[in-house]
Image (cartoon, grey):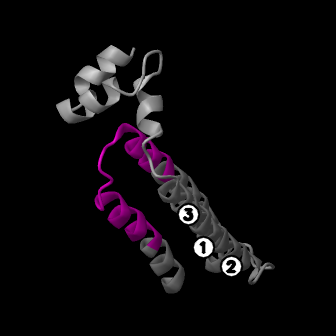
């Protein structure tokens, strides 16, 4: 388990890990212990904040469905359902991005800004759609 994982790591990291008594541990547990807890806590705060944003989007969509409720065929009624759906999609996207970043940190991979650009771009498209509606 550990020997196969150590072979895939750079030589400097392999040398450091061999001297620290890692026998019997999996490589993922070794790498996970190297992640700074303050980084993980800040990522959790960011995730909770983005979930809060998704809930606001869903509430705005619910408000659109409540406008002109007597005319079920109105455009605002259907727009509200689309906004609710986009809010749910945004919550799922936030969760997937958060989990992916945790996995990248645990593996020792670099967390790139590409994911953040796509993530924030998706949220801005939802906000733009709400403003146009």
Q: What residue lies at 25% left-to-right and 28% top-to-bottom?
A: 15
Q: Which of pointers 2 and 1 lies earlier in the amino acid sequence?
A: 2
**Residue beneath the point at 33% across and 29% down:** 17
The numbered mark at residue 64 is: 2
Q: Position of residue 121 (x, y in %)?
A: 38, 69
Please tell me which of labels 2 and 3 falls first in the chain: 2
Pick the quarter of the image with the N terminus. Answer: top left
Secondary structure state at the residue bearing disc 3: helix
Q: Which mark is residue 79?
A: 1
The x and y percentages for residue 72 are 74, 73
- 120 vs 101, nearest the viewer: 101
When asked about the image quadrant of residue 113, the answer is: bottom left
- Give the residue at the far left of this rendering: 11
Looking at the rendering, the stretch of residues picked out in magenta corresponds to 98-123
At horizontal 46% and vertical 38% (from top left) the residue drawn is 32
> Quick check: is 106 in the magenta stretch?
yes
- How far apart marks 3 and 1 lie (CA) works out to 10 Å
Locate residue 114: give its quadrant. bottom left
**Mark 3 or mark 1: whose residue is earlier in sequence:** 1
Image spot of residue 20 (x, y percent): 39, 28
Q: Residue 86: which numbered mark, if any?
A: 3
C-alpha distance separating marks 2 and 3: 13 Å
């Amino acid at each position: 388990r550990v020997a196969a994982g150590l072979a895939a790591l750079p030589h400097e990291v392999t040398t450091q890990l061999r001297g620290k008594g890692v026998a019997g541990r999996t490589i993922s547990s070794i790498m996970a212990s190297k992640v700074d807890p303050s980084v993980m806590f800040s990522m959790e705060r960011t995730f909770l904040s983005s979930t809060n944003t998704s809930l606001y989007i869903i509430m705005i969509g619910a408000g659109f469905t409540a406008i002109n409720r007597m005319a079920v065929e109105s455009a605002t009624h259907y727009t509200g359902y689309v906004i609710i759906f986009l809010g749910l999609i945004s919550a799922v996207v936030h969760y997937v991005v958060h989990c992916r970043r945790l996995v990248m940190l645990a593996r020792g991979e670099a967390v790139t800004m590409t994911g953040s650009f796509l993530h924030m771009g998706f949220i801005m498209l939802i906000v733009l759609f709400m403003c146009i509606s």
